[in-house]
Amino acid sequence: MKDFGTYTPRSRFERWTDARLPVIRFAHDTAVSYPVPRNLNYFWTFGGILTLMLASQIATGIFLAMHYVPNTALAFESVERIMRDVNYGWLIRYLHANGASMFFMAVYIHIFRGLYYGSYKAPREIIWVLGITNLLIMMAAAFLGYVLPWGQMSFWGATVITNLFSAIPIVGDSIVSYLWGGYSVGNPTLNRFFSLHYLLPFMLVGTVTLHIWALHHVGQNNPTGVEITDFKTDTVPFTPYATVKDIFAIVSFMVFFSYWTFLMPNYLGHADNYIPANPAVTPAHIVPEWYFLPFYAILRAIPNKLGGVIALGAAILLVAFLPWLDTSKVRSMRYRPIGRSLLWIFAAAFIGLGYLGSMPAEGGYVIAARILTALYFGYFVALPVAGLLERPLALPLSISESVFAGRSIKDCTSLPLDGSVEEMIKPKVSQTAG
């Protein structure tokens, strides 16, 4: 990517630092002068929101780890002590628990934006694969964290999910034994889950860093899917244009986050998880957290255990292969009528599976889950065919044309006009005058 200008150290300290460790130059090139497409909308603010939520989860998690006891006889009581006896422990725990939900809500919106605008297409394949890797690490960390309070749903959720690995031929039983650390879910399991839950967010920092690095190397996609042709007319500096938009979106999201944390802190949790774990009493209905429900419904929709595990893994991994499955030359679904319809069906199936995952695995719920599972996987079959058959709408010639089409030169005061842009706008002005 091309920069808007060269960073020039001003003070003696900046010059001394820049010659030895150019961190100020790096920050300037990354967050100030970095060129971004001028037509980005608020869906592009969720990257900043996710970065903030990751930092929040790590910070609150570190404080919780100072007081949590990873022992089956003491874990539940230690969580209660955090809530009642630790200064602001209730706030830290509610921020962490609800923060996980906000994290997944933001990441699902972020992924849907990538699907709708074709952000997975070349040359951004590695960015996309790293993003799905981030999702997998998030899911692993969230599952491990859900076990730590050691309530009824924590214990039985761990039992059900870890037992799924036994369906893997040859090595399945060995994996389950390693996860358990014994013959059933118990104290060794809790210790291992606590250690991994603490470690994975720091691994996530590494993969997120690679994700951002790859993004800054090839540049951001935009709602039209058209690549930057002229940095002078198609882009604006990250600061202040994108920065102001990111700050507004982050503040709005934090208001939403605060609503759940302060007014409905337990709404997204399961009532059974406020009961200490009891291996002798099985809950009437074992369900994971809401952000796992679509995949849980897919798992239960397949009557065969191994088939269900394969479908569960494929439901996530197939998303990572979209850069090679999508055969269309057009990125944005704005200009792909058939692809856009398929994507909305896919999104509706995902939301429907989320609802069915919270329902008992019986009767019509199972039938509906199988239908929606077929629609979910059908997207990955239909999309390559649609890319070959559909006739896309006409694309704008450039990003600036998509922004300023139909507007006069006076309206484009923020745009540094050159001859090419004037020629693009003049026909629009003359038509309007006529």
Image (cartoon, rainbow, N blue to C red):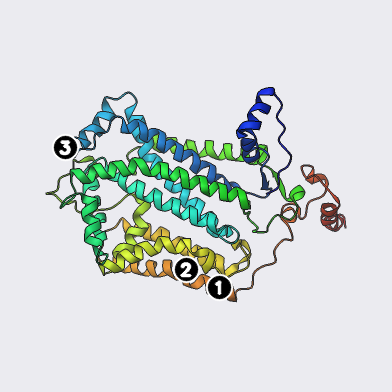
**Would residue 430 appear left or right of 271 to someone viewing this image?**
right
Q: Is residue 335 above or below residue 195?
A: below
Kind of element beneath mark 2 = helix
At which x and y percent is residue 86? 29, 25
Mark 3–mark 1 contact, CB under 8 Å?
no
Ranked by sequence position, the earlier of labels 3 and 2 is: 3
Q: Amino acid at mark 3?
A: Ala
Q: Separation of disc 3 and disc 2 at Cα?
A: 47 Å
Q: Mark 2: few, some, or many residues within 10 Å (few <14, many ≥20)?
A: some
Q: Separation of disc 3 and disc 1 at Cα?
A: 56 Å
At which x and y percent is residue 245? 61, 40
Q: Disc 1 designates what residue?
A: 386
Q: Disc 2 designates what residue?
A: 379
Kind of element beneath mark 3 = loop
At which x and y percent is residue 285? 23, 54
Mark 1–mark 2 contact, CB under 8 Å?
no
Residue 198 is drawn in which quadrant? top left
Q: Mark 1: few, some, or many residues within 10 Å (few <14, many ≥20)?
A: some
Give the quadrant of the C terminus. bottom right
Q: Disc 3 designates what residue?
A: 73
Q: Mark 3: few, some, or many residues within 10 Å (few <14, many ≥20)?
A: some
